[in-house]
Image: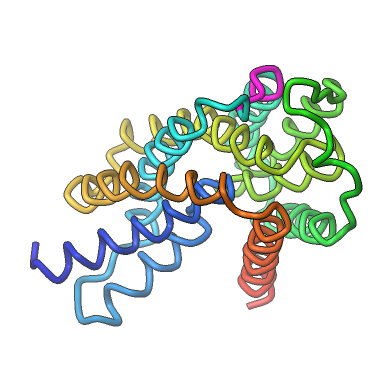
């Protein structure tokens, strides 16, 4: 690979993973379009959609590990929340991946677009008194947590996309989890949900390993840095960055659907 191509891939992985660690999403909503469009714009070989999907899947796996490591201290990781939502989203994504063959592509995309739109609206709703609860005293409705994660997992599995950016508003608005705990726990939940997709991409040989390794290295460096920045940022700032990212993702989903 050319040196310029290596640097381009590294920077894409670094930027996406930094934001991933900072706001608690897998980062593929940022890296996927960057990997698809930036290399050919700079005169390098273009990746196919399948190749981008494979690279993104394994990169998310390692980016979330890096983010979790940075959040391991301070009580940010809510183990019960991770267990209930992580297992539910994993089961849902497997069912969704299998069931996708039974539904029309258009219907699948509409379901996902509607979920993303609801997530966007939720992010802009007021979140009162959520941050006042000490992290060791946070409680949540386990039935709602598991059922909502299952629904998101099914939808994400059907369209073959990550659902972390939909889970975050659910944690913040419905379950009333403090922002920084939601970010840390979301990284752990995304890690669990990425296990199946990463294994599937490896087994079916959909990963281009040279750029994937560069992205993994960038992820392991950038995700902990992003997480440490996020821990020190004001909650309102984190919520606004997350809301804008989710809004951008929703707009893109609808544009792809309409286009």
Query: Residue at the location (20% across, 71% down)?
Result: 45
Query: Residue at the location (79% across, 28% down)?
Result: 145
20 versus 138 height, above or below: below
Residue 117 x, y percent position in the rendering: 78, 61
**The C terminus is located in which quarter?**
bottom right
Query: Residue at the location (77% across, 52% down)?
Result: 115
**Nearer the observer, 58 or 175:** 175
Query: Residue at the location (36% across, 50% down)?
Result: 222
172 versus 196 height, above or below: below
Magenta stretch prevailing secondary structure = helix
Counting every numbered tag in the picture gives: 0
**Nearer the observer, 247 or 53:** 247
Residue 247 x, y percent position in the rendering: 70, 66
Q: What are the residue bounds of the magenta stretch?
A: 77-82
Is-magenta flag for residue 135? no
140 versus 238 height, above or below: above
Q: How is the image coloured?
A: rainbow
Residue 230 x, y percent position in the rendering: 55, 49
Q: Is residue 81 left or right of residue 49?
A: right
Q: Quadrant of residue 202?
A: top left
**The N terminus is located in which quarter?**
bottom left
142 versus 40 height, above or below: above
Is-magenta flag for residue 80? yes
**Nearer the observer, 137 or 120:** 137
């Amino acid at each position: 690979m050319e040196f310029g191509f290596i640097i381009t891939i590294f920077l894409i992985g670094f930027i996406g993973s930094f934001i991933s660690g900072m706001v608690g999403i897998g980062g593929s909503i940022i890296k996927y379009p960057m990997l698809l469009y930036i290399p050919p714009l700079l005169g390098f070989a273009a990746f196919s959609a399948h190749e981008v999907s494979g690279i993104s899947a394994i990169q998310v796996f390692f980016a979330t590990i890096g983010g979790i490591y940075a959040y391991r201290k301070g009580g940010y990781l809510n183990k019960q929340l991770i267990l209930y939502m992580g297992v539910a989203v994993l089961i849902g994504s497997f069912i969704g991946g299998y069931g996708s063959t039974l539904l029309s592509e258009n219907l699948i995309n509409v379901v996902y677009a509607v979920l993303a739109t609801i997530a966007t609206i939720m992010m802009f709703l007021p979140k009162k008194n959520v941050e006042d609860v000490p992290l060791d005293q946070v409680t949540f409705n386990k039935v709602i947590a598991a059922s909502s994660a299952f629904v998101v997992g099914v939808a994400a599995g059907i369209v073959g996309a990550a659902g972390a950016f939909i889970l975050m508003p659910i944690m913040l608005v419905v379950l009333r989890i403090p922002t920084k705990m939601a970010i840390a726990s979301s990284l752990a939940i995304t890690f669990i949900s990425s296990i199946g997709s990463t294994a599937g991409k490896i087994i079916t040989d959909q990963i281009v390993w040279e750029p994937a390794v560069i992205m993994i290295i960038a992820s392991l460096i950038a995700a902990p840095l992003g997480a440490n920045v996020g821990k020190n940022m004001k909650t309102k700032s984190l919520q606004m960055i997350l809301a804008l990212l989710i809004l951008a993702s929703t707009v893109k989903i609808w544009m792809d659907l309409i286009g």
